[in-house]
Image: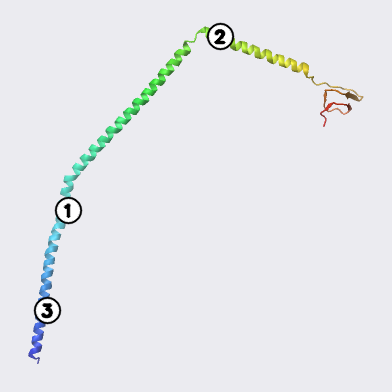
Amino acid sequence: MPTYCTVCYFDVKRIEFTEEVSKQINELDARIKALEKETVLLHTLPKKLSTQLGEVIPSIAAELNRLNQDEVGVLKNILKSNVEEQNNVIKDSVLRLKQWKEELENIDGKSIKRYCLGFGIGLFVSVLASLGATYIMLKQFPQKIQIESPENVTVQNSDVGLWGSKNLQIKGNVKDHRR
């Protein structure tokens, strides 16, 4: 049989154990209550978030629309100024072309005749100069001469150039192109 001390000891240990377990159960209950609150908060969060987003998104969309409209206005102004600038450049070019056309139409017949007369005189002088140069070249420089002789031909101290003849004797200072 167990002794009284042992029973007391077990009783004390049981009481301590019970108190410890009760303490842990109380802590777990407190934690469960806290988790219940957090769970409720987590369940209500999507609703609150969607409500908040539903309130904020239209104002964000309106602000983006306003910003886009401002940008569109700026771009329209830039495009309009570019088109006006190009239009002015085209008008200026058309005006210049009209002035050139009028200048060309205003050239009178006398200036055309003077131009043609000057050109004709220049052409006539050029033709005369080329004819004179051709005549001098033909008279100054001899043309091809062909000598056919069964006997040997002797050329002495001449300014004549000689080309390919087999029965030719050269004496003195003569240009010989046969080599």
Which residue occupies 61% across, 11% down? 120
SS for callout 1: helix
Image quadrant holding the C terminus, namely top right
Q: Answer left or right for 131 relative to 28.
A: right
First reached walking from the N terminus: tag 3 or tag 2: 3
Query: Where in the figure is residue 89, as x and y percent of width and height?
Result: 39, 23
Q: Answer left or right for 177 relative to 120.
A: right
First reached walking from the N terminus: tag 3 or tag 1: 3
SS for callout 3: helix
SS for callout 2: helix
Residue 167 location, quadrant = top right
Query: Where in the figure is residue 42, as x and y percent of width and height?
Result: 16, 57
How far apart marks 3 and 1 lie (CA) works out to 44 Å
- Please say if 55 is above or below 137: below
Q: Looking at the image, which residue sits at the far bottom?
A: 1
Query: Where in the figure is residue 119, as x and y percent of width and height?
Result: 59, 12
Q: Name the residue carrying label 1.
A: 46
Circle 3/circle 1 CB separation < 8 Å: no
Which residue occupies 9% across, 76% down? 19
Q: Amino acid at mark 1?
A: Pro
Q: Amino acid at mark 2?
A: Arg
- Find residue 17 and name its label: 3
